[in-house]
Amino acid sequence: MMEKKENGKMARKKIPLSGWAAGAVLALFLIVPLFIHNPYLLHIFVLVFLFAYLGTAWSLVGMAGQLSLGHAALIGIGGYVSTLMFMEWGVTPWLGMIVGGILCGIIGVIIGYPTFRLRGPYFALTTIAFAEILRIYVENTEEGPLGIPLRGGMGLLVPLKGDAPGVFQFSTKEPYYYIALLMMLAAIGLSFFINRWRMGYYLAAIRSDQDAAEALAINSTKYKLIAMAISCVLTALGGTFYAQYFRYINPERAMGLSMSIEIALVGVVGGWQTVLGPTIGSILLSPSGELVRAYLGGTYAGLHLCLYGLLLMVVILFLPNGINGPLIRALKRLEAKMWGPKMIEKVTAPETAKEDKP
Amino acid sequence: MSILEVKKLNKSFGGLVAIHDFDMSVEKGEIVGLIGPNGAGKTTLFNMVACFYSPDSGRVIFQGKNLAGMKPYHVCALGIARTFQVTKPFVNNTVLENVMVGAFSRTAHSHEARKKALEILEFLEFQEHKDVLGNELTPADHKRLELARALATQPRLLLLDETMAGLNPSEKPHLLELLRRVRDQGITLLVVEHDMKAVMTLCERIVMLHRGEKLVEGTPQRVANDQQAIAAYLGEEYATT
Amino acid sequence: MDFELLASSFLMGLMLGGLYAAVAVGLSLIFGIIRVINFAHGAFLMVAMYASFWLWYFFGIDPYISTIPVAVVFFYFGYNVQKWLIRPIFIREKALVIEPLGVLLLTAGLDLVLSNLALLFFKSDPRAVVSPAASATIDLGFVDLNVPRLVVFLLSFVIAGALYWLLNYTEKGIAIRSVGQNREAAALCGVNVYRIYNFTFGIGTAALALAGGAMVPFFYVNPSMGLSLAIKSFIVVVLGGLGSVPGALIGGLILGVVESVTAQFVMSTSSVIFSFLLFIVVLFIRPKGIMGVLET
């Protein structure tokens, strides 16, 4: 975000400590599969990357001030399109991914256009409504339009092809790991550049005060729609990854409200107004959620969700802007001897010199 | 050709007639003041020139172009910028970032926008505040920020909505001086004001509204001496010296 | 189309609508006045119903009787949820520019906690009160009306009437309405806004508990019933108009009828789609709802 000077804008002076920290974490991620071979641990990393990716994509619409709770629908559409194209016509999911992405971009714009004038909670409720309509429709439809077999609540099983990179399937976790990591980095990169470019400034302005923004030549609808389109395309691509990784996709899990909430949660906990926020949110939430589900989900059904809910409540109550804000501020405080707080303090001190002007 | 022409403008809100058969023209480089008692319709008129409202009938013509049906962002791109009576800073962003948003209307490149924003801040003697967040400013600085942002869009016509409101007497002369400097850059100013002293010293021509209609128009001297105007609004002690 | 079938489904729809109305009327107050989305609305209902159920199961207390003390308890429950959980977010929101999802996510978390605690303790088997009254019916010739459902239908009018009286004929009610319209102005007139919020949330939750108690005789309680009823309640509230108690009643009835009648033509699980579509249409065409008094 603009108020967070990351390793880019002020790079002429020196790279701030937060930049070094991020770089170190990245390097760590790159070499992890060389040391860790336990598929379950790698699975957790994949989840972290996947939800960081989805959270970052989600936050792009959030930057425009509209927080959606229906993004799971896009995962569903993306996953279903690529899987169906593969199952029915043998089209490789790599291509199906693009088709799904474009389709979702268009859908996002069509739905966004009338929906954007709804304020906060109404927008959220509407996104829930759209997503639920889709989910219920797919869940109850064996055969869709044009005879496409949607298989209702049963979901789609991706035909197993073993190790087949050409059709986006691998028999080990490592390739998925790197693909997910790459996607996450791409999303973060995109978010970063959007923030630095005009678009980021415009989205922040629209979010802050739409009337003031329009008085400054900003076509708010246009920019909101662009942000929405990008967000939808990215999320749909994530849907294809989801389908290819789990090799199974069904309406309840992929298009359900809980998926939408998980994505929003990652963004809100980490801080959706920042570039790295959702990633940090995912790093915190995905492993704990998965571990609780694995170890406690069996004996005490629902305990992991209960704890998730508790965590959600605690975060909302005690961490207003997500975790990212305080974290970045803490890192900055470490290095801020000359810069940062001192400078701002000096600047906001009363300007006594001004009054002397005639 | 006048830079702004308003012809037979009408606007009602439900049963309330806000503006009635209003004509006005503004020449390039003028500083025109728009005054009138509360409820006279100044802000409504303002909002119609800036295209935040559309008139029921009549035309607003800017540099020969009819603004009918345009949105505020079109109008800004054409060269009309406005400030808001109740300032609307982007509170989570710094002063510099706020002004850059304005500058981005003329360029898509961040470094150009930043350069332009810094220039504007220097012009308004505001540059030391560039890293202050929008919600940490004093009211006077809020006004300067509004002005800076509007100027960053490189307008030909600047609409100022009660810029003096909320400032204490020591802050006003400085702002007036800045406004004169803005005009000297070739920008036409249309100013809505309640502060009579400011209006008399700043404006070359004054248009007075009363109950949605033009009551009197002319030099500050003339308007100040007009019996109707005085009856409606002015106090005698505010004539120009 | 078979007239008898249509008429009976219409009547069933009204009964269903009465249920929706009874559940949603409290939310109309909460959403309308406090403007928060309480995702846990359905979970609260579920907990209230379990309370009534267990009181019947262990102590043999008739749900129609136990519903009153349960409602009182839930008044305090709702009051404190608002006071301790939601108010801090309001106070924080004043400092920030926007935090639209704050309360929504908080209550979503609360819903997760409550539903899953219920799942843990009560297991997922649905429960229902077994009593002779539960299956009593009134024979109308072409259709049999189930008495407990009829009771809920009538109860929805009673609850709506009571809330309407509260809002329009008591001093407290005027304070509540004023806060809903303009909370700063209300505060300036000496209204303790936060206490009104607490009270409103409490009343809304109590109304909900009342409806829940009456539903226990025929509705199978299970831990996961909350969310879908919560969403339906929001549809009802938007349909009927924010802050309008009669609107919630009408909205609920309409929703019930729409669902019931469309279920004759499509699979019953799909008929929910029409509810959502109705919701979207109303939001776009007439966001104020049928009887909306407050601005959206």
Image (tube, coloured by chain):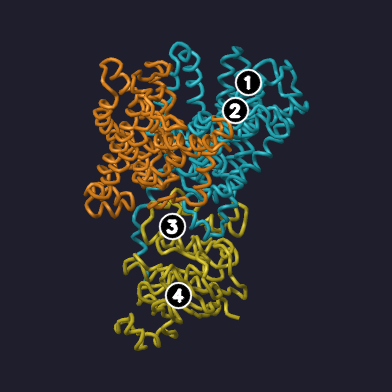
Q: CA distance from mark 3 to mark 4?
A: 25 Å
Q: Position of residue B199 (x, y in %)?
A: 39, 77
Amino acid of disc 1: Phe
Q: Which chain is cyan?
A: A
Chain of the residue displaying label 2: A
Q: CA distance from mark 1 to mark 2?
A: 19 Å
The residue nearer to you, when weighing A49 against A161, is A161
Chain B: colour as depicted: yellow
- In this picture, residue B171 sits left or right of residue A339: left
Can you say which quadrant of the picture contains the N terminus of chain C?
A: top right
The residue nearer to you, when weighing A68 against A197, is A68
Tag on residue B19? 4
Q: CA distance from mark 2 to mark 4?
A: 57 Å
Q: Position of residue C27 (x, y in %)?
A: 37, 39
Q: Earlier in the sequence, mark 1 or mark 2?
A: 2
Tag on residue A246? 1
Tag on residue B239? none
Q: Nearer the viewer, mark 2 or mark 3?
A: 2
Q: Nearer the viewer, mark 3 or mark 4?
A: 4
Amino acid of disc 2: Glu
Quadrant of res B80: bottom right
- In this picture, residue A41 sits left or right of residue C155: right
Q: Is residue B25 above or below residue C63?
A: below
Tag on residue A139? 2
Same subunit, labels 2 and 4: the answer reads no
In terms of secondary structure, where does tag 2 sit? Answer: helix
Same subunit, labels 1 and 2: the answer reads yes
